Image: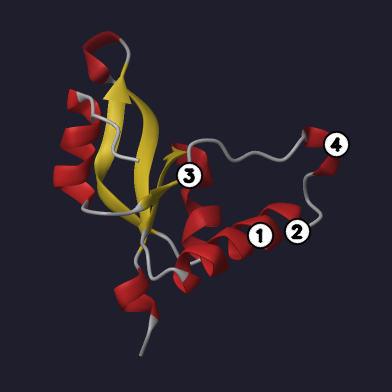
Amino acid sequence: MNVPRTEWQKKLLEEYGEYTWLTEFAIAPAHQSQSLGRVLLRHVIALVEKDRLDLALTAVAHKVGFYSACGLEPVGEPLMYGPNKSLTGVVKMRWQYSTSRF
């Protein structure tokens, strides 16, 4: 089904190309530090890899290390917000199918 894209979606498509966008990813605090996030994210990556797609998401700045350890790479500069854009908010992250194969 072809759904018309919003301007925001068009901009993302121009910047990233075709990809799978992970919009929400979190583990409840009571279940953190049990490797559940790593297991779930690896499963998501396996699904997009099977379809030969790229994966994109935004990560809060203090979680970039987690996503990097799972094979994603930061894309561009962190998005800044707040007064005079002085606070780091989120970082665009991407896992690319084409670079996962050697």
Q: Quadrant of residue 95?
A: bottom left
* Amino acid on which the number 4 mark rests in the picture: Ala
Residue 2 point in image, percent of width and height = 28, 38
From the viewer's side, name the closer residue of 62 and 55: 55
Of the numbered discs 3 and 4, the one sitting upstream in the chain is 3
Measured as percent of width and height from the top left, residue 81 is found at 31, 19
SS at badge 2 = loop
Residue at screen point 78% across, 51% down = 33
SS at mark 4 in the image: helix
Q: Amino acid at mark 2?
A: Ser
Dot 4 or dot 2: first in sequence order is 4
Q: Residue at x 30, y 75 (%)?
A: 98
- C-alpha gap between disc 1 and disc 3: 14 Å
Q: Secondary structure at mark 3?
A: loop
Is 23 on the left or on the right of 91, as rendered?
Answer: right
Image quadrant where one finds the N terminus: top left
Q: Which mark is residue 35?
A: 2
Residue 71 in percent (x, y) is at 47, 67
Q: Residue at x 36, y 29 (%)?
A: 88
Report the residue marked by disc 4.
30
Look at mark 3 in the image and give the residue it sits on.
22
Q: Quadrant of the C terminus?
A: bottom left
Residue corresponding to mark 1: 38
What SS does tag 1 mark?
helix
Per the model, the C-alpha gap separating discs 2 and 1 is: 5 Å
